[in-house]
Image (spheres, grey):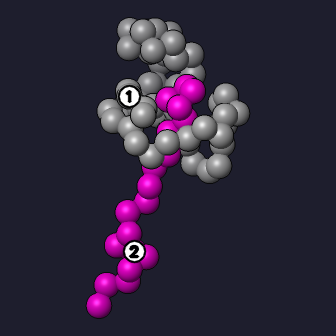
Amino acid sequence: MANVAAVRKKLVTVCRECHRVVEGEACGICGSSNLSTDWTGYLVIIDPERSEVAKKMNIKLPGRYALKVR
């Protein structure tokens, strides 16, 4: 019989302010605790200075982000 905890999917939270994928109770970048589990589009920014998507989303730091957060 499978362990229920092993089967349960981890909910990923995203900051509603800066769209950063967050682990914990608050965003480590902007400090906001306004988090959501309702988001779409996974984006990894490696070099924000050269990324056109990062410029359009006003992302200044490398990391994992969501495209749309509700």
Q: Is residue 13 magenta?
A: yes
Counting from the top left corner in percent of width and height, residue 66 is at 41, 32
Residue at (38, 9) in percent of width and height: 52
Give the distance between the C-alpha atoms of the residues marked 2 and 1, in whole angstroms.
28 Å
Q: Residues within 10 Å of mark 1 (few under 14, many from 20)?
A: few
**Residue 3 bears which disc, if any?**
none
Residue found at the far bottom of this picture: 1
Magenta range is 1-19
For residue 33, which quarter of the picture?
top right
Q: Is residue 37 above or below residue 31?
A: below
Counting from the top left corner in percent of width and height, residue 37 is at 45, 46
Counting from the top left corner in percent of width and height, residue 58 is at 51, 12
Q: Mark 2 or mark 1, which has the lower sequence index?
A: 2
Q: Is residue 14 magenta?
A: yes
Q: Amino acid at mark 2?
A: Ala
Q: Which residue is mark 2?
A: 6
Residue at (38, 69) in percent of width and height: 8
Instruction: Name the image quarter holding the C terminus.
Output: top left
